[in-house]
Amino acid sequence: MSGAFLAGVVAGYGIAVPVGAIGVLIAGLSARTSLRIGAAAGMGAATADGLYALAAVAGGAAVAGALAPVETPLRWLGAAVLLALAGWTAWGAVRRPGVTERNERPATALRAYTGVLALTLLNPATVIYFAALVLGSGGAGGGAWFVTGAFLASASWQLLIAGGGSLIGRVLTGDRGRLVTALVSSVVIAVLAVRLITT
């Protein structure tokens, strides 16, 4: 049990710690809205990681093999969604100076959770990563513990990112600070979207 759980924790941190577009999105949501919204988004990403770990334990190479033919279209779809998010965030920040989230349709925890869950599920590399780890360790022994460890590790990291974004948001509470963080977030997400289809 403890060996499989520890392997899951290591795998969960291994996939979650490199901050990519999803991490930037979570931090940006926390900075512009609230810790509750950012935490919900982070749990969406962690849920996707947990589901992919479960898929890898349950199907391993078969799941990875099934996703391989559609990996390129999924990358393009993921990049398109990220570019749309980057554009939407930038447009919302500059369309009317002085407008904050108080005047706009408020974000909800459920929308943040489902949106980030769906976006994270567009990354087929995650299930391939988990499948390689499961197969490399000799199979899916202790599968439930592996999945639990991976989910908890990912969740703890995503919540740390959300907390960091919330702290930044408290420092940058004015309209100018919100504008700057939204634009920086948009640029970073756009760059990561381009990298997604060029690597």
Image (cartoon, rainbow, N blue to C red):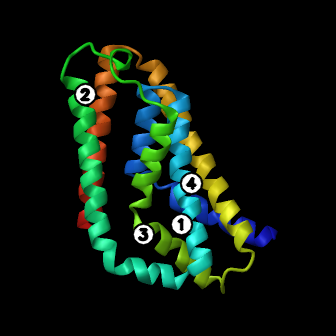
Left or right: where 159 falls relative to 117: right
Mark 2 and mark 3: Cα distance apart in space: 31 Å
- Circle 1: element type: helix
**Crowd rating for badge 4 (residues with CA inside 10 Å; few <14, some 14–19, many 20+):** many
Q: Is residue 181 above or below residue 130?
A: above
User: Of all residues shown, which one is farthest toward the right?
Assistant: 1
In the rendered image, the quadrant that contains the N terminus is bottom right
Which of disc 1 and disc 3 is earlier in sequence?
Answer: 1
Residue located beneath label 2 in the image: 92
Q: Using the rendered view, name the quadrant where residue 151 is placed.
A: bottom right
Q: Amino acid at mark 2?
A: Gly
Q: Position of residue 193 (x, y in %)?
A: 27, 54
Mark 4 and mark 2: Cα distance apart in space: 28 Å
Q: Is residue 75 above or below residue 165?
A: below
Q: Position of residue 101 (x, y in %)?
A: 37, 20
In this rendering, the label closer to the viewer, 2 or 3: 2
Residue located beneath label 3 in the image: 125
Mark 1 and mark 2: Cα distance apart in space: 33 Å
Left or right: where 115 falls relative to 73: right
Q: Using the rendered view, name the quadrant where residue 60 is placed.
A: bottom right
**Crowd rating for badge 1 (residues with CA inside 10 Å; few <14, some 14–19, many 20+):** many
**Crowd rating for badge 2 (residues with CA inside 10 Å; few <14, some 14–19, many 20+):** some
Which of disc 4 and disc 3 is earlier in sequence?
Answer: 4
Residue located beneath label 1 in the image: 52
Residue located beneath label 4 in the image: 47
Identify the residue shown where x is 43% and y is 84%.
Answer: 65
Residue 9 shows in the view: no
- Is there a contact, CB below 8 Å, between mark 3 and mark 1? no
Residue 181 shows in the view: yes
